[in-house]
């Protein structure tokens, strides 16, 4: 007995919560590593600017973490509230990484608390720096564990279903499923990449809006460098993710590529408009899809004709996929040009229009994260647990989901607006010039 | 010890942890809002900023640990409680959102926005109320089966005296726990004004606490006789608990041994909490769910236990470090030096 009404609103609420959580979660995973790198450079070079960079970013991080924790707690409970049937099954097989995740949170929360409230409390700066290591480890570990759960939903294994009974359960086999390596890798690197470009875009924005302080130039250069490294890694791991799909979820890839007929030498369609199976205005790269899928221009690629009608995911994921990939390559290009330009002293990379492009980088990366998750999740439809359970069978039977949807929309709106307002105010009130002057007065040091 | 009992004990222990540190947090919010209204804000705000801001995230993880753990060890709870708790749990989440954002937004943002402090304080009372509803529901009689689906009967729930007596107990306990802890903390911080004020709160709130406890026993006897009988069987646990309560109040009355009072407070609630939990055994939800028929498979249970032991090895030293730095460090407690990022 499926309650269609409840299914619909449960979907909507899950989509909202995750779409919102993932912004803060991504920052939560990536930024501690970047703070760590900045502080480390500061200690090594004895350059107060990098230390201040770490300190200021950490201060902003307090706000985003809080929203991440609140929305994460929401989604954690909502999984049981909205998808009780799924969680009952999942609890038996994949509870282990979920449980381990809470320890990762604990670890992160504890050391973050200590780190934030012990600036200048230690004589030896390195001791304070060391407190960051568990923060970054805990944050990345939580991403790893939760992504394992998501990978399991795509490639379930480690149990058998005999007459509706779960038997022969192997928690570790369930964790190390085929989707796990590429998914975990891609999710982690994209979090680092996105965080780097967000911080770079803040620096670029400050440089455009008045401040010409060397602090922002150092910061921009550092984060563009890191962004380049992580965006290249992103593209590589994205390619591996596609190879995984070819092997285990060909219907998702075929839907994302609008690949209708199984054929050899398949070409790759980028963007375009679709009318039934006719695609117009697409950029067509001959043999592209065969190369992407198998490194071989003549290889055969499974098309949607191999799947029953009702198991084909919505075809609009094509646009999401193309958007993500385009942004990926665009950001590799932007950061590469900036770094090369910097090394070669090209003047125009300091021009207004190029800086505006770098400002765009942060929001673009966030859009890519959203597009990627939507592609991956919608591409799994109609399944919640591929080949075992459909979304409609998993949902709650409660009749009040619509009201709760309204409640959470209001909460997310307040949290979203609130976090932006508070962050802006925080840095407006205490611009870098003032903070450097204050520190100078305090220490009598040689800061510029 | 069977795996079932091990599992529920671990979860109950962490829930106890949440109840204690959560209460301190909730109550402090209420006292803070109250002091804003009565124009004494300077007395409490400092203590709240110094002690609560660094640890609210840790407090929250205790809760997350509990609800993730219970679905791990007892997956069937996801079905029964997940389906029925949609509304109360969502309200609790909304209240948690207010608290979380208060700590983050207020520590740098518009410090001292009155409306915000007020909502933060109100959420400190509403949260224990909405969370305690879960305990009420677990006593049975509030969930009907609609075909295969459990449905929460709101009318029965809201008209039951048991519900309201548990809500009142939760609120009184939160305020009492919080006041006793903060009295100790303010005293350790050498803040005489705050100590005086909080001591008064602790004494005041001990009275409704004692009354509501009695009230609950009366209501429970009517509502769930089996549970009541098992509680009576374990009267000695509750008797020691009551004794500890009396000594605590005595210490605070005589303005001495605040540290001892704090430890006795923990002991008092530990005994009561575990006495309640043990007498609830084996039911997770009267009469639908016991810890045995909802338990996960053995392979998962063993791996969860192993993960738990490894996790503790990581956790205990880290928690010790926090306590050392924020709770038992004289300079920090006294507010010497501001080391915030
Ligand atoms: C900054 C964000 C970002 C960028 C630039 C890219 N991706 Fe991505 N991608 C993600 C962010 C992301 C993600 C949000 O992290 C996803 C969603 C679910 C997942 O596992 O990772 C994802 C999923 C995802 C999947 C689906 C995996 C699955 O469903 O199991 C594929 C095939 C790719 N990506 C491939 C690529 C390629 C070839 C890229 C070329 C540059 C690329 N991605 C750039
Ligand atoms: C890592 C752990 C994740 C888990 C366990 C998970 C869980 C789920 C569940 C239970 C559903 C079914 C509900 C539905 O169909 O709407 C779902 C779908 C969905 N999720 Fe995920 N999700 C995860 C990550 C994400 C993230 C980070 C996003 C970010 C945008 C996301 C976006 C979506 C979307 C858009 C759907 C809807 C698909 C559709 O209805 O067509 N998911 N996910
Ligand atoms: C359905 C999927 C998800 C669930 C159930 C979930 C659950 C949670 C919970 C319960 C918290 C709060 C923990 C606390 O109290 O400290 C949280 C925060 C967090 N989540 Fe999620 N999460 C999900 C998806 C994700 C994804 C996909 C990522 C990363 C890619 C992620 C990364 C984080 C991080 C890093 C935090 C810590 C808060 C921060 O630093 O911003 N989560 N999540």
Image: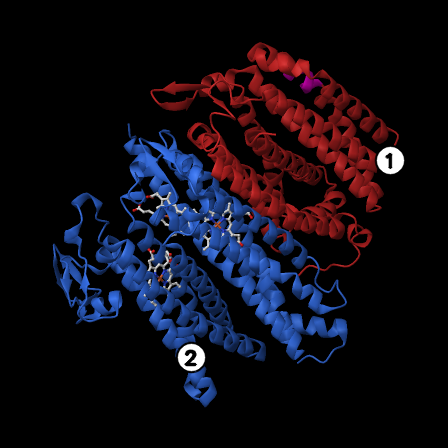
Residue B215 covered by magenta stretch: yes
Report in which chain the residue with disc 2 lies. Answer: A
Q: Position of residue B331 (x, y in %)?
A: 81, 54
Disc 2 crowd rating (10 Å Cα; few below 14, some 14-19, many 20+) is: few
Q: Which residue is mark 2?
A: A352
Query: In the figure, what tint was chain A given?
Result: blue
Query: Residue A383 or B109: which is nearer the viewer?
Result: A383
Q: Relative to residue B12, is residue A444 depicted above or below?
A: below
Which tag is nearer the camera, tag 1 or tag 2?
1
Which labelled disc corresponds to residue A292?
Answer: none
Q: Which residue is mark 1?
A: B257
- Range drawn in magenta: B211-216
Query: In the figure, what tint was chain B given?
Result: red
Q: Position of residue B244 (x, y in %)?
A: 79, 26
The kind of secondary structure element at disc 2 is helix
Q: Residue at x 49, y 44 (%)?
A: A96
């Amino acid at each position: 007995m499926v309650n269609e009404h409840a299914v619909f609103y449960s979907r909507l609420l899950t989509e909202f919560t995750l779409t919102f959580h993932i912004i803060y979660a991504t920052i939560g995973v990536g930024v501690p590593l970047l703070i760590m790198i900045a502080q480390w450079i500061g200690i090594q070079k004895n350059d107060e600017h990098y230390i201040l960079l770490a300190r200021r970013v950490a201060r902003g991080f307090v706000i985003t973490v809080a929203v991440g924790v609140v929305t994460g707690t929401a989604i954690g409970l909502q999984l049981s509230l909205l998808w009780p049937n799924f969680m009952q099954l999942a609890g038996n097989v994949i509870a282990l990484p979920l449980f381990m995740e809470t320890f990762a949170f604990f670890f992160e929360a504890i050391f973050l608390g200590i780190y934030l409230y012990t600036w200048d409390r230690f004589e030896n700066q390195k001791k304070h720096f060391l407190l960051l290591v568990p923060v970054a480890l805990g944050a990345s570990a939580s991403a790893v564990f939760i992504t394992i759960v998501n990978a399991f939903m795509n490639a379930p294994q480690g149990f058998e279903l005999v007459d509706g009974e779960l038997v022969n359960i192997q928690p570790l086999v369930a964790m190390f499923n085929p989707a796990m390596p590429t998914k975990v890798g891609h999710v982690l690197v994209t979090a680092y990449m996105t965080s780097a470009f967000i911080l770079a875009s803040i620096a670029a924005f400050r440089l455009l809006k008045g401040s010409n302080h060397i602090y922002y130039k150092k910061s921009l250069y550092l984060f563009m460098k890191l962004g380049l490294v992580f965006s290249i890694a992103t593209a590589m791991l994205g390619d591996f993710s596609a190879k995984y799909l070819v092997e285990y979820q060909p219907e998702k890839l075929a839907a994302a590529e609008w690949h209708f007929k199984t054929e050899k030498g398949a070409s790759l369609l980028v963007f375009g408009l679709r009318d039934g199976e006719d695609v117009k205005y697409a950029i067509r790269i001959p043999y592209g899809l065969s190369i992407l899928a198998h490194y071989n221009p003549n290889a055969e690629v499974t098309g949607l004709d191999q799947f029953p009608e009702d198991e084909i995911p919505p075809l609009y994921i094509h646009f999401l996929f193309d958007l993500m990939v385009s942004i990926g390559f665009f950001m590799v290009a932007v950061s590469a040009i900036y770094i090369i330009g910097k090394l070669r002293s090209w003047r125009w990379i300091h021009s207004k229009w190029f800086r505006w492009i770098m400002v765009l980088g942060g929001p673009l990366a966030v859009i890519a994260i959203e597009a990627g998750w939507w592609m991956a999740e919608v591409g799994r439809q109609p399944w919640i647990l591929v080949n075992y359970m459909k979304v409609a069978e998993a949902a709650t039977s409660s009749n009040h989901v619509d009201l709760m949807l309204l409640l959470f929309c209001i909460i997310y709106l307040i949290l979203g607006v609130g976090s932006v307002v508070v962050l802006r105010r925080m840095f407006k009130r205490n611009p870098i010039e003032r903070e450097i002057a204050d520190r100078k007065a305090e220490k009598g040091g040689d800061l510029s | 010890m069977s795996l079932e009992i091990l599992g529920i004990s671990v979860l109950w222990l962490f829930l106890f942890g949440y109840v204690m540190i959560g209460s301190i947090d909730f109550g402090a919010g209420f006292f803070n809002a109250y002091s804003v209204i009565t124009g004494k804000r300077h007395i409490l705000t400092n203590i709240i900023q110094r002690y609560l801001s660094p640890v609210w995230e840790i407090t929250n993880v205790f809760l997350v640990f509990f609800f993730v753990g219970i679905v791990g060890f007892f997956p069937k709870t996801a079905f029964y409680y997940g389906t029925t708790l949609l509304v109360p749990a969502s309200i609790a989440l909304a209240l948690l959102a207010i608290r979380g954002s208060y700590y983050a937004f207020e520590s740098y943002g518009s410090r001292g926005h009155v409306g915000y402090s007020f909502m933060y304080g109100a959420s400190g009372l509403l949260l224990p109320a909405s969370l305690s509803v879960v305990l009420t529901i677990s006593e049975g009689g509030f969930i009907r089966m609609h075909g295969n689906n459990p449905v929460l009967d709101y009318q029965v729930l809201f008209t039951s005296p048991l519900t309201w007596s548990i809500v009142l107990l939760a609120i009184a306990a939160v305020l009492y726990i919080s006041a006793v802890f903060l009295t100790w903390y303010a005293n350790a911080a050498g803040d005489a004004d705050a100590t005086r004020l909080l001591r008064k709160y602790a004494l005041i709130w001990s009275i409704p606490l004692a009354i509501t406890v009695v009230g609950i026993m009366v209501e429970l006897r009517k509502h769930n006789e089996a549970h009541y009988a098992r509680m009576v069987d374990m009267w000695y646990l509750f008797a020691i608990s009551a004794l500890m309560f009396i000594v605590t109040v005595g210490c605070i009355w005589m303005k001495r041994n605040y540290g001892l009072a704090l430890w006795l407070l923990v002991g008092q609630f530990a005994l009561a909490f575990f006495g309640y939990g043990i007498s609830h055994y084996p039911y997770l939800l009267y009469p639908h769910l016991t810890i045995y028929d909802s338990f996960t498979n053995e392979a998962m249970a063993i791996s969860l236990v192993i993960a738990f032991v490894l996790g503790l090895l990581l956790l205990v030293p880290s928690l010790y470090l926090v306590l050392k730095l924020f709770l038992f460090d004289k300079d920090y407690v006294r507010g010497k030096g501001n080391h915030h990022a």
